[in-house]
Amino acid sequence: MGTKSKIAIASLTMGIVCFLNLLGIEKAIAAIVFGWLGLKEAEVEQKAGKKLAYAGIILGCLYIVTITVLAVLYGPKFIEHVRMMKG
């Protein structure tokens, strides 16, 4: 268990980055997918990084839930705000 899973590190990175750009849904999905792959790699190849993979999965899911709740609560106002931010 000496080396860390690079996929798990990518998962955590994508989980953090998705919060930096509003509507980074594609990054959140990538964080979840990479996290899942990182967990499998850590288990099969006996690499460290399970906690990183779990963190990436949690951040990705948290982002998706947050965006969904905001869209439901604020509806058209939220969508218009996002469009204005993207330029």
Image (cartoon, rainbow, N blue to C red):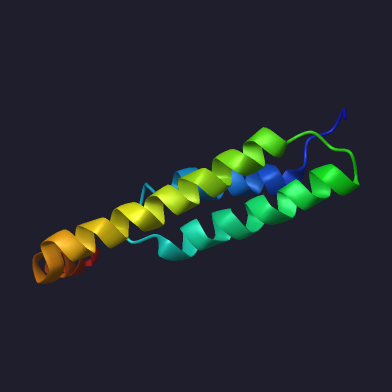
Q: Is residue 64 visible?
A: yes
The furthest residue to the left: 77
| Quarter of the image with the C terminus in it | bottom left
Q: In the image, residue 48 lies at what x, y percent? A: 79, 33
Marker count (numbered): 0
Q: Is residue 81 above or below residue 11?
A: below
Tell me if 66 is positioned left or right of 12 in this view. Answer: left
Q: In the image, residue 49 lies at what x, y percent? A: 73, 36
| Quarter of the image with the N terminus in it | top right
Tell me if 32 is positioned left or right of 75 in this view. Answer: right
Q: Is residue 13 above or below residue 33?
A: above
Q: In the image, residue 34 lies at what x, y percent? A: 65, 55
Residue in the image at 68% along x and 54% along y = 36
Residue in the image at 74% along x and 45% along y = 6
Residue in the image at 19% along x and 69% along y = 83
Taking depth in this image into account, of 13 and 36 the one nearest to the observer is: 36
Tell me if 37 is positioned left or right of 13 in this view. Answer: right
Among the 4 quarters of the image, the one containing residue 72? bottom left
The furthest residue to the right: 45
